Amino acid sequence: MADPEVFSSMGNKQERYDALVTVYSADLFRYALWLCRKREVAEDLVQETFLRAWKSLHSLRDDKAAKTWLFTILRRENARMYERYSPGFDDDYDFDSVAVEQEDEQVMQLRECMKMLADEYREPLMLQVVNGYSSKEIAGILDLTPGTVNTRVFRARKQLMSLMSQDDSFGQLEVVS
Amino acid sequence: MNCVEFRRHCLESGVTLDNETMAHQQSCDTCQRFYQQQSQFESLLGQALAVPVPDGLESRIKLRKSFAPRWQMRQLAIAAMLLLSVGVGLRAFYGPAPLDEALLAHALEAHSYRGAADQPMPLARVSQITNGLGAQVNNLGDIRYAGHCRIHGRMAVHMLVNTDMGRYTLFLMPDQPLEQRISEQVDGHQVVMFPSGKGSIGVVVPAGSDWVESTEAQVRDAVTWSI
Ligand SMILES: [Zn+2]
């Protein structure tokens, strides 16, 4: 993750914007895919997020807040999309292009379990595992306290392990209460 | 630190150890085993959640943004006309519909955007985008951009196509039914819309172009619907 400081010196709107796209577009896409399940829709969502960001870039006073700001826009756009546009898509997650390498059976199984988690558990876990964000950063994005984030990722892991153990190899995994 | 605290830390942080937890892990066999299992789980979790980011995402975002600052009434006028023609009305356009307004205006600006794409978009990528909305496009020539947009909350494909005569913008709108063909000049642009499949298609060329009809004919031939 690039140091947020890199943005600070950039007074130029265009450069500032391009830097945001470079640093955060991939993170936002991964997050969006788990939110809306379809690659095309996820990309649309990220596009919308950045269009919004471009238009209101002036309101981002502190570039250190960029990450939280962008994720907040994305979450809002996602809600708006669902409200305004009832997707004709089925409910499946779109991981077609993920299954290119020889896909580990446990990985696929875990992915299935991941789909079963409540959004409130899946989202913070995703931000932590996929994007490598700290509890404090996740708290900023999801508008929670860091303590709540910790509790949720803790429960998310416990639920995942419990779901996995119903199948096989993680059966012996000790789960603390 | 005790064992319960250690395990809680692992499940909260994803086996990222600080000094204190490291010390406990090294001094406690049970927690060492727990830690190893947990590391294995984290590695699986990382693989399960990692999804590849589409090629060119970053540049497509930068491209779209390039339309934004050049918003003018010209685009808004065309957008309003398109919306009127699909039976939505100005109220929807100027009312609480900033998302549509943004998308449509940006999409409409696309055809005049010269820096858009230096190379034809790979046909596989184009198909991926059109197929998602049930459209197949054959022999349309040099497609420089294809992406999804929303027009009044319904997904549409917008495309930029280069021809010998110039560039035009094409909208495939599977969910915007239209009763009959419309051709209007709107502030510097010729907009042609006609029913197609269960929805409609829009073609936007610079006003005064004598190639709008041949383009329309080509588009009619090129687009088929599977829905
Ligand atoms: Zn211990």
Image (cartoon, grey):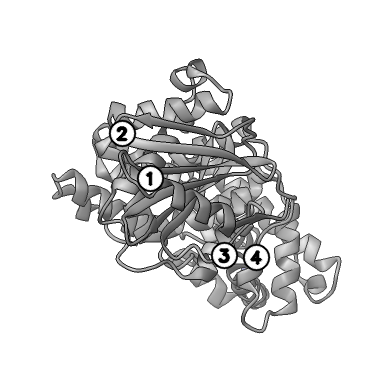
Q: In the rendered structure, which amino acid carries the disc numbered 1?
A: Phe
Q: Amino acid at mark 4?
A: Phe
- Cα distance between the residues tagged 1 and 2: 10 Å
Q: Are marks 2 and 4 on the same chain?
A: yes
Residue ID at (60%, 72%): B47
**Pointer 1 or 2: first along the chain:** 1
Of B62 and B31, nearer the camera is B62
Q: Is residue A38 left or right of residue A28?
A: right
Residue beneath disc 1? A50
Q: Are marks 4 and 3 on the same chain?
A: no
- How much space separates mark 2 and mark 4, taking CA atoms? 32 Å
**What is the number of the mark on residue B138?**
3
**Closer to the eye: label 1 or 3:** 3
| Residue type, mark 2 in image | Ser
Residue B140 seen: yes
Circle 2 — which element?
loop
Depth check, front residue: A52 or A104: A52
Residue drawn 82% across the image and 71% down it: A171
Label at residue A56: 2
Q: Would you say the beta carbon of the disc 2 residue lies within 8 angstroms of ligand 1? A: no
Disc 4 Cβ-to-ligand 1 distance below 8 Å: no
Q: Amino acid at mark 3?
A: Asn
Tell me which numbered mark, 4 or 1, is placed earlier along the sequence.
1
